[in-house]
Image: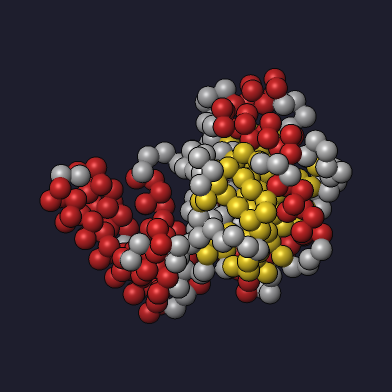
Amino acid sequence: MDLSIIIPNFNTKNLLTKCLTSIETSLSAALIRYEIIVIDNGSKDGSIALIKRSFPHVVLIQNKTNVGYGKSNNVGIKRAKGECVLLLNSDIEVLDSAIKTLYSSIQTSKDIFLGGRLLNPDYSPQSSCGPMYTLPVVFTMLFLKGDVLGITRGSPSRISKVDWISGACLMGRKTDFIQIGLFDEKIFMYMDEIDFLYRAKQKGYTIVYNPDARFIHVGAASSGTKKTPILNIYTGLLYFYSKHRSQSELSVLKVLLRIKARMVIVICNLIGRKEIVSIYEKALALV
């Protein structure tokens, strides 16, 4: 088996249908022996029935509850028969021969992880790679609109070596995933790929962003409300720093996160955005 494509799913039946169909279309003319593994995390929207009915060749692994991104992918990676593994979110739609492009690239390189260019549904570029979250990068992200300006994350137009790529589309060899230690299952969602790729770089691996492989990514399809990403980002940053950085750096991070939360709370109280106030009050309680 050449390639195992692993897709965690949680109540995204319609998006999953598009994802699976696009994979089959993309690989229809490619000479790649592949399998698709869907890890369902207790979906209640008919996802399981859909897979059994319309995609019976897909390997289906059923969890009773939503175990999160990292653990879901770990289960799939361990089960995979392919030499290479492609991790895809269920809200990904593969364009043209994107999978073949990534697969061809990995065949010519060793000690590498690859990601493609993610696009919004309107085909505008979606920032999906960037530098490691050092304190200057975190400061820029929190206070200088670093994400918006493309400083802390971006979508380069050329093949680039980066510190991280989005876990929504990540390819590597199965043996390399295992060698690095798989995903940290203590991270439920957000920062999981950052943690994994940080460990990969520590072991000498190269992280490459290839814009020639294009994928539509709906984004945040199964993560719930706006509250969930913010709280998970706070949790993920705190965990990452407690695991990989010094105590002094963790202390500075906490100060930055507190200042950000308090600024948002004050401003949103003044303009009557109570729902955002509530979110950042919960975020502040995490620090």
Seen in the picture, residue 112 relative to 84 is either above or below; the reply is: below
Total residue callouts: 0
Seen in the picture, residue 155 relative to 79 is either above or below; the reply is: below
Q: Residue at x 20, y 44 (%)?
A: 273
Across and down, in percent, residue 52 comes to 70, 23
Instruction: Judge left or right: residue 56 versus residue 189.
Output: right
Instruction: Judge left or right: residue 277 versus residue 217.
Output: left
Q: Residue furthest left?
A: 270
Across and down, in percent, residue 176 comes to 73, 62
Q: Is residue 272 visible?
A: yes
Q: Is residue 78 visible?
A: no
Q: Nearer the viewer, residue 173 or 105?
A: 105
Q: Residue at x 27, y 62 (%)?
A: 260
Instruction: Judge left or right: residue 20 versus residue 266.
Output: right
**Image quarter of the C terminus:** bottom left
Q: Residue at x 87, y 43 (%)?
A: 31
Seen in the picture, residue 152 relative to 227 is either above or below; the reply is: below
Across and down, in percent, residue 115 comes to 64, 56
Seen in the picture, residue 64 relative to 52 is either above or below; the reply is: below
Q: Nearer the viewer, residue 160 or 202?
A: 160
Q: Examine the image and state in which quarter residue 149 appears.
A: bottom left
Across and down, in percent, residue 33 comes to 85, 43
Q: Examine the image and state in which quarter residue 17 appears.
A: top right
Q: Residue at x 15, y 48 (%)?
A: 271
